[in-house]
Image (tube, rainbow, N blue to C red):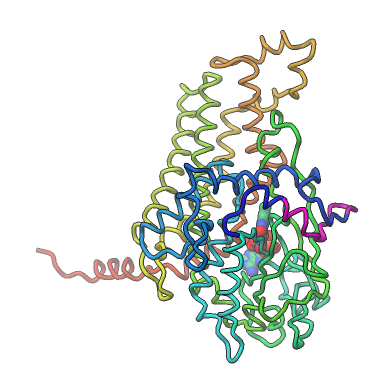
């Protein structure tokens, strides 16, 4: 098949019966028509169609090394720095389309599975060809242009105890039994953004203890979302119908779900790790999947910071607040974020090197810095928008007022220094959706947590970062005997 069109994506979505729970509704088919999913489905279809636009074709796709068909650029196993630039150019096109609001476009997990396939030697275990499984799965996803979701974290029941020490050992998803057909899994995981994907990856993220009791939880595998017994418990939708009143929520609400495994059979050819805490704890770093996910995330974060910069600047200029020094300072702080994130991204590509698995990997030092910096600086972007737009964010009547008897007064009282009432309402509604509505609130939470708990990430960063050269410099000065 190769790179999909939007129509092909929607057809597969609607024709793959799955178990999506939305409140008391069990949605099995026609997902693209359901109010909670139709808008993001339509957005994803537009992203897939971009792969076929003549002017974008060479940016978005490349020739498959096995079939010669055009496939998505985020599957490219880079061999040069130029390839890294090709990957990020493609990802930027998708990220810019949503102003960085769609975090889990297909390129995020395509990047992970691409890196894991290059590192297939990591998965080899005894007579079981898990490395071959990863390679076959990567090619299957690439050639069919499938959309992946993933779930890494155990349910948030009691974080002071590990999965085997909860009140029920089957709260966190784990192995029930192994048969000649495969592995049976029971329990749950959170969260899976984009439950309207085609496939789900189940990977370890946080540290798994190596005691025997925790082994049944140390697994990695992939399943089609319609696997028997697999259920997605969706949160309330933030999607909306009016693109005028909710310009972002009406397009980009990705949806998040808790995933329940009701004795789901994972066939052996879909197993990548099983009861293997040692590899589970090393898989993301050693395969460099985390590096390529961080690369995609940095591209999107640059896109989002740039979008917020445009938004804040327009807000300030529109109401004539751009001359106030503190408003200029806030916008300057957004620019600092834009330029810092861009510099980290660019240096990661410029300092790329062929990794131990033979592909060109962006330098992880700037990318790990970016992924630790972003949860700290991105909430400030949203705060700046609120501080600049202030009460104007609430002077925001529904679009229908424009067709009411109040229209003359709206035209008079809702105009701005730079625009008429319609322009001003559109801008302020966009701002509220970005930083204040249910959709905007989820965006802030997403940026804080999508890559993991920032507190534990910072500890890991502290332990990983090479501080020795700087300590040596201090020691050298302490003991220097060179006064003249
Ligand atoms: C919008 C959104 C979308 C997401 N999408 C996905 C997805 O698609 N796939 C996916 O796998 N995950 C997804 N996640 C989940 C994300 O991976 C987790 O939120 C993140 O790993 C943090 O885990 P947690 O939410 O369970 O928080 P917890 O681990 O429960 O943390 C709660 C609090 O306790 C503290 N805490 C807990 N344990 C420790 C500890 N050992 N040491 C110190 N402090 C601790 C934390 O710092 C935090 O303050 C998403 C999250 C959000 C918010």
**Could you tell me which residue is drawn at 69 percent across and 22 percent down?**
395
Query: Would residue 164 be found to the left or right of residue 425 on screen?
Result: right
**Could you tell me which residue is drawn at 29 percent across and 66 percent down?**
474
- Farthest residue in the left direction? 484
Q: Nearer the viewer, residue 419 or 140?
A: 140
Q: Nearer the viewer, residue 151 or 178?
A: 178
Query: Would residue 383 be found to the left or right of residue 351 on screen?
Result: right
Query: Would residue 88 be found to the left or right of residue 244 on screen?
Result: left
**Could you tell me which residue is drawn at 57 percent across and 80 percent down?**
132
Q: Magenta stretch containing residue 19, yes or no? A: yes
Residue 474 vertical position relative to residue 60 in the rendered view, above or below: below
Residue 74 vertical position relative to residue 169 in the rendered view, above or below: above
Q: Magenta stretch containing residue 4, yes or no? A: no
> Residue 261: horizontal and vertical position, in percent?
79, 70
> Residue 58: horizontal and vertical position, in percent?
45, 50
Quarter of the image containing the N terminus?
A: bottom right
Q: Nearer the viewer, residue 288 or 390?
A: 288
- Farthest residue in the right direction? 24
> Residue 37: horizontal and vertical position, in percent?
75, 47
Quick check: which quadrant has ligand 1?
bottom right
> Residue 442: horizontal and vertical position, in percent?
68, 47
Quarter of the image containing the C terminus?
A: bottom left
Residue 29 vertical position relative to residue 50 in the rendered view, above or below: below
Give the extent of the magenta segment.
11-25
């Amino acid at each position: 098949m190769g790179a999909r069109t939007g129509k092909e994506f929607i057809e597969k979505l609607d024709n793959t019966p799955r178990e999506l729970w939305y409140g008391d509704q069990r949605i099995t088919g026609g997902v693209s028509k359901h109010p909670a999913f139709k808008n993001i489905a339509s957005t994803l279809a537009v992203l897939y169609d971009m792969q076929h636009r003549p002017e974008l074709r060479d940016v978005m796709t490349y020739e498959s090394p096995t079939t010669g068909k055009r496939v998505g650029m985020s599957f490219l196993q880079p061999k040069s720095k130029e390839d890294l630039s090709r990957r990020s150019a493609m990802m930027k096109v998708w990220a810019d389309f949503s102003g960085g609001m769609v975090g889990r476009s297909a390129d995020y997990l395509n990047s992970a599975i691409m890196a894991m396939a290059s590192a297939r030697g990591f998965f080899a275990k005894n007579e079981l060809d898990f490395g071959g499984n990863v390679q076959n799965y990567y090619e299957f996803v690439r050639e069919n242009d499938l959309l992946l979701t993933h779930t890494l974290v155990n349910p948030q029941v009691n974080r002071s105890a590990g999965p085997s020490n909860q009140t029920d050992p089957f709260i966190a998803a784990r192995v029930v039994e192994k048969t000649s057909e495969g592995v049976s899994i029971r329990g749950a995981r959170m969260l899976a953004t984009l439950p309207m994907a085609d496939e789900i990856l189940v990977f370890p993220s946080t540290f798994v203890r190596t005691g025997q009791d925790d082994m049944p939880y140390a697994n990695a595998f992939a399943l089609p979302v319609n696997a028997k017994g697999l259920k997605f418990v969706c949160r309330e939708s933030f999607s909306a119908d009016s693109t005028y009143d909710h310009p972002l929520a009406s397009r980009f609400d990705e949806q998040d779900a808790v995933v329940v495994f009701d004795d789901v059979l994972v066939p052996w050819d879909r197993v990548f790790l099983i009861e293997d805490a040692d590899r589970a704890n090393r898989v993301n770093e050693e395969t460099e999947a985390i590096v390529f996910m961080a690369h995609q995330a940095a591209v999107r974060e640059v896109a989002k910071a740039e979008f917020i910069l445009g938004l804040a600047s327009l807000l300030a200029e529109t109401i004539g607040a751009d001359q106030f020094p503190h408003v200029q300072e806030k916008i300057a702080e957004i620019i600092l974020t834009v330029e810092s994130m861009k510099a980290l991204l660019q240096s990661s590509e410029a300092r790329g090197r062929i990794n131990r698995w033979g592909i060109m990997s962006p330098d992880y030092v700037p990318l790990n810095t970016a992924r630790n910096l972003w949860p700290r600086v991105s909430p400030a972007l949203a705060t700046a928008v609120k501080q600049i737009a202030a009460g104007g964010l609430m002077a925001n009547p529904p679009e229908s007022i424009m067709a009411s008897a109040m229209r003359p007064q709206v035209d008079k009282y809702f105009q701005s220094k730079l625009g008429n009432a319609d322009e001003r309402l559109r801008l302020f509604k966009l701002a509220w959706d970005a930083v204040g509505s249910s959709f905007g609130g989820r965006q802030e939470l997403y940026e804080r947590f999508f890559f993991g708990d920032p507190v534990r990430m910072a500890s890991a960063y502290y332990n990983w970062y090479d501080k020795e050269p700087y300590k040596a410099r201090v020691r050298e000065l302490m003991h220097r005997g060179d006064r003249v």
